[in-house]
Image (cartoon, rainbow, N blue to C red):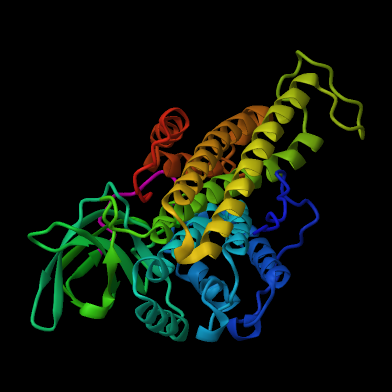
Amino acid sequence: MTIAPPAPHAPFGDPERGAGATSPDATAAQGAGRDDWLHIARELADDLATDAVEREQAGKPPLDEVARLRESGLLTLLVPAERGGGGADWPTAYTVVRTIAAADGPVGHLLGSHYFLSSGPRFFAAPDRAARIERAFTAGQWYWGGGIASQEPPLMLTPTGGGYLLDGHQRYGSGVGIADRLVVRAAVPGTGEPLAVLVDTAHPGLVSGSGGETFGQRLAAGGGVGFDSVPVAADDVLGSLSADEGVLSPFAGLAAPTARLVSAQFCLGVAEGLLGEVREHGRAAQSAWQPFSPQPWPGSPPQDPYVLTAYGELAVAARAASALADQAVEALTCGLARGEDLDDEECAEIAVLASAAEAAASRAAQEITTGALDAVGVPAAFARHGLDRFWRDTRTHTLREPVAHRLREVGDYFLNGAHPPFSLPA
């Protein structure tokens, strides 16, 4: 089966984009095609970009930002149309995440995490249960937060007469301060098997936001969350997250590369957003390396060889990581299309490619968000420009997902043919 690769991304942003556009409501977005969804995302990104610096510096809970996502119809983008959603595919969702992240990194992170977590029922639950949850999701227009990272100690899920009680503390979850539903990692006492669990944040006994402030992703509403005898219905236990061989089907195993490519698209989006801003600065401002290089004539394109080389390095990093991410998305799309016919070897190949793409995107984002500031020079430090937010958002994210783990997986597969373990990112 041949899948056309996703549309290429411009690694320098779009200098011609407008500002202040208003996204259509969710009803108008029903049944939209890929081009329509990308247009909606671009308009929303333009809207977010107009005051991204001010909102980031204010650091308020992103209630308004999530309301904008809800009104645009983007929250239910991946839900099948017959269940009330947008009926779009993962290549479209990844492009949307990247587009939003380029304008506002934390909002892109919120949306990417939401897409992965709200897809949890399709990966881990029985089909009828997944359908029921997705219909309720679209009817309520839920924003999903939480996290089921492999390194997160599981909460305890104690059986009761009519379901379960959830207890414990999760160290970090995305969007926990503003989510309508959380997906968390829990275990039943005795067996210790980790499970994906859906939690209604309106239940008593749930306390969110106890994770400490971070220097980046201030609008991602992330942090710790505590559970004190929070009720969970039996139907809201989605399924196993066990990494033991044979527990998960190869299709369920695709949850890991799906999440890793969300991480990659976020990194690339933030990097491309910064490149789009500093490109305009580089065309108009004096060279950061004056007086060591000649000042270009007024009105002419920049000719400083140091500046041109610096931007050339950043362009290469962006394009290389973008190409690898597109290759991984195409492979994942083919794997998802195979469904339960997917075998273990195919799943492993996709997982390794996604790990490579995440590692490349992480490295490129760190290189770009540092090197671009060097190219701008001293003005990059001015708070009014807000360029530092790109570096802080990237670095906060990459601290949670060290590249070393992904490189070890790629190396072990390359040398020994070892399948990577089922490991979900933070």
Image height check: is 338 above or below 375? below
Asked whether, in this view, residue 271 is left or right of residue 57, the answer is: right
Image height check: is 304 above or below 266? above
Residue 269: x percent and y percent? 60, 49
- Magenta stretch: dominant secondary structure: loop
Image height check: is 403 above or below 119? above
Residue 326: x percent and y percent? 63, 48
Give the farthest residue toward the top: 292
Extent of the magenta region: 208-217
Residue 154: x percent and y percent? 20, 56
Q: Does the magenta portion include 211?
A: yes
Instruction: Name the residue rendered at 84%, 17% in the picture.
Output: 294
Residue 339: x percent and y percent? 48, 65
Instruction: Name the residue rendered at 49%, 59% in the picture.
Output: 112
Q: Does the magenta portion include 239?
A: no
Residue 51 in view in this figure = no
Pick the front one: 131 or 417: 417
Counting the numbered discs, the total is 0
Identify the image quadrant of residue 7. Answer: bottom right
Identify the image quadrant of residue 203. Answer: bottom left
Instruction: Name the residue rendered at 46%, 49% in the picture.
Output: 260
Instruction: Name the residue rendered at 72%, 63% in the picture.
Output: 19
Identify the image quadrant of residue 248. Answer: bottom left
